[in-house]
Image (cartoon, rainbow, N blue to C red):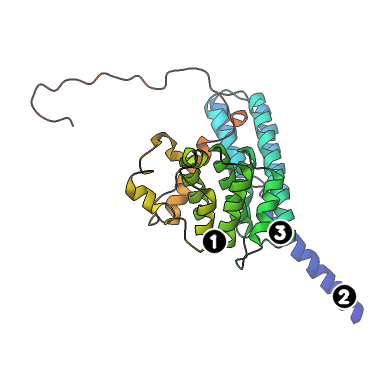
Amino acid sequence: MRKRIDIEMGVLSLMVVLTATSVWAEPLSIQDREAITRLGSAQGRSENEITPLLDHVSKAGERGLPTESLLNKMREGLAKGVEPKRIDPVLRQMTSRLESAHEVLEEAKGRGISEGNRQRAVETMAEALARGATVDEVRELSRLSQEGRHKATQEELAAGAKGLAVMKEGRIPSKDGTALVGEGMKQGYRSSELLDLSREVKRRGSDFEEGRASLKALREQVSRGERSDRLFKDDDRSGSGGDRERGDRSDRGGKGSRDDSDRDRSDRQEQSGSRDRSERIDRPDKVDRVERPERSDHSGRGRD
């Protein structure tokens, strides 16, 4: 009887492991394969050219890596008429970054960071690493986040790492940016709040660099529990930071009243526009649209 119970428990444990693996793994569906094969065929690419790319993405999914960004990159390249052999190294570089993101997040999980939305965490962390965040900086953020009462998730850690990378793009020193983001995580800032904070700091980068604003003072505000949507309200009301550097709006956070779905949408737009150049797939030069001169309206009526 005892032996039978042990066997049943062993089988149950194996089923749990296999179930967890299947939840993580994202092998390509037949529909995905067929759709991309048709897209390649429409561009004059044979199935033999497309299959190795699909196999690479499928194997990445079987290893537990998110595949959506890889599939999107394939679709983008094929739609632009790029040769599959030029798409392959881009997919490999993206996969390498996803693997690095997965590893650093698993390390953080072993140190007490809870899982949260794993797929989004891996994709966001991969982007953070591509934009300049380092593994050592992620480890420091993980350590700082655990000094507070809030239990940070992998998704928040990834957003913090991306936020730090954004600040570094605005010439904020790594040490100062890490301390600020870490304080936000300790105070329970959500992923969207961490990204809003980083965009505003980047937008005001010259103020911090030239001494018109203080990162230390900002960090003290965060440590007192002030939320990200209120940190810069006085500056914006006085006109010191309101509409400056309009060209940098892709890295700005929205107003405090904007909901999470809007933040996610702006985040996706920022992500698609800020990929590392080595991940871009160029298309042959061509004119996408012929601009027609506007016809003057002599009838006195307004335009349609």
Q: Nearer the viewer, mark 3 or mark 2?
A: 3
Q: Distance between the residues labelled 3 and 2?
A: 30 Å
| C-alpha distance separating marks 1 and 3 | 24 Å
Query: Foreground residue, 127 or 293?
Result: 127
Q: Residue at x 73, y 60 (%)?
A: 111
Amino acid type, mark 3? Lys
Judged by depth in the image, the label closer to the viewer, 1 or 3, is: 1
The residue beneath circle 1 is 223
For badge 2, the amino acid type reads Asp
Going by the picture, which residue comes out furthest to the bottom?
A: 1
Amino acid tagged 1: Ser
Mark 2: give few (<14), some (14-19) or many (20+) Cα within 10 Å: few
Q: Whole-percent x and y of residue 95? A: 68, 39
Residue at image x 76%, y 65%? 15
Q: Is residue 190 visible?
A: no
Residue 79: x and y in percent read 52, 29
How crowded pointer 3 is (Cα within 10 Å; few <14, some 14-19, many 20+) is rated as: some
Q: Which of marks 1 and 2 is nearer the N terminus?
A: 2
| Residue at image location 17% in from the left, 30% down from the top | 303
Does residue 211 show up? yes
Using the image, determine if residue 18 lies above or below residue 178.
below
* Quadrant occupied by the N terminus: bottom right
Query: Badge 1 local density, few (<14 within 10 Å), some, or many (20+)?
Result: some
The residue that appears at 88% across and 77% down in the rendered structure is 4
Q: Name the residue under label 3.
A: 109
* Residue 6: mark in rendering: 2
* SS assignment at label 2: helix
* Horizontal side of residue 161 vs 267, given as left or right: right
